[in-house]
Amino acid sequence: MKIAVAAYPIDWLNRWNEYVGKLRMWVRTASEADAELIVFPELAALELASLAGEGNAGDPRRAVDALTARIKDVDDLHASLAREFDAHILAASGPLRLPEGRVFNRARLFAPDGGRGAADQVAPAPGLRDAFGLSPGAGAAAFDTELGRIGILLGADLTEPELAAALAAAGAGVLLAPAAASPDADNVLCAAASARARETGLPVALAVAIGDATWAPTLGRLAGRAAVYDGTGAETAAGKPDTPGWVHAEIAAAPAAIPLEPASVILVPLA
């Protein structure tokens, strides 16, 4: 499987078409390297809150509502790009308000055949949980796709060994780790990704949000580098720190087997 993981800059957007052009350029660039699985980072969907103006983008609760109001158009755009470029796309996550009122840090996966599914963060970091009023997801999510079973460790979930173990035991062949971190925490992400790969024997693909997002107080300055780790925990591909772009790798997504607590994984059909 050919995978592309992003070091993706969060930008201030003035018009919807700026986002459309940016996302299409990023997906096209990944596709030009024959990527079959394209991974965007955690919380980068919050750049869409800038379309609601500075006052809304700078307030966590208003930003949630601004992003939620846009998410159907965002998802339709991702679905269209997945079809056009014949690739599975894990969209950047963001805090989304569900109809019943709860807010989840949610990533969405789009398949070329039109299938889609959602993964909610299980263990939100306290700062984000409090700022956005996040609820925890019910369990780590795994998607059945034409590429095999794909597990998601969203943000701080990457630091929870039991979640990775449960996904491996459920037959995941690769663990995707979309993340975002401040400059003093980016090394923690790399260490956690390497550890989860070593513990499970699965490749781990780390995508990161980068850039100056001080207009969004909950984000501030973000740093890191995208990387892919093999089943021994070794880094097989990596980008330069704080440098936008794709990291490409070819991985063998063979399932592993570790004892599983029955309720630890939610299998998400792409429907």
Image (cartoon, helix red, strand yellow):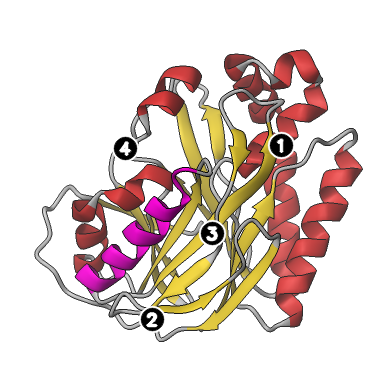
Q: Earlier in the sequence, mark 4 or mark 1?
A: 1
Task: Find numbered disc 3 in the image and state the secondary structure of the residue it sits on.
Answer: strand
- Residue positioned 64% across, 56% down in the render: 242
Given the image, on which type of amino acid does mark 1 rest? Answer: Glu
In the rendered image, the vertical position of residue 184 relative to residue 84, given as above or below:
above
Of circles 1 and 2, which is in front?
1
Assess whether mark 4 and mark 3 are in contact (beta carbons under 8 angstroms): no
Q: Which secondary structure is most common in the magenta stretch? A: helix
- Residue positioned 75% across, 13% down in the render: 55
Residue 213 point in image, percent of width and height: 68, 34
In-front residue for pair 196/254: 196
Disc 3 marks which residue?
Answer: 207
Q: Is residue 197 magenta?
A: yes
Q: Earlier in the sequence, mark 1 or mark 2?
A: 1
Disc 2 marks which residue?
Answer: 253
Residue 127 visible (yes or no) = yes
Given the image, on which type of amino acid does mark 2 rest? Answer: Ala
Question: Spatial distance from mark 4 to mark 2, Cα to Cα?
Answer: 25 Å
Question: Spatial distance from mark 2 to mark 3, Cα to Cα?
Answer: 17 Å
- Residue positioned 12% across, 60% down in the render: 260
Range shown magenta: 184-200
Task: Find numbered disc 4 in the image and state the secondary structure of the residue it sits on.
Answer: loop
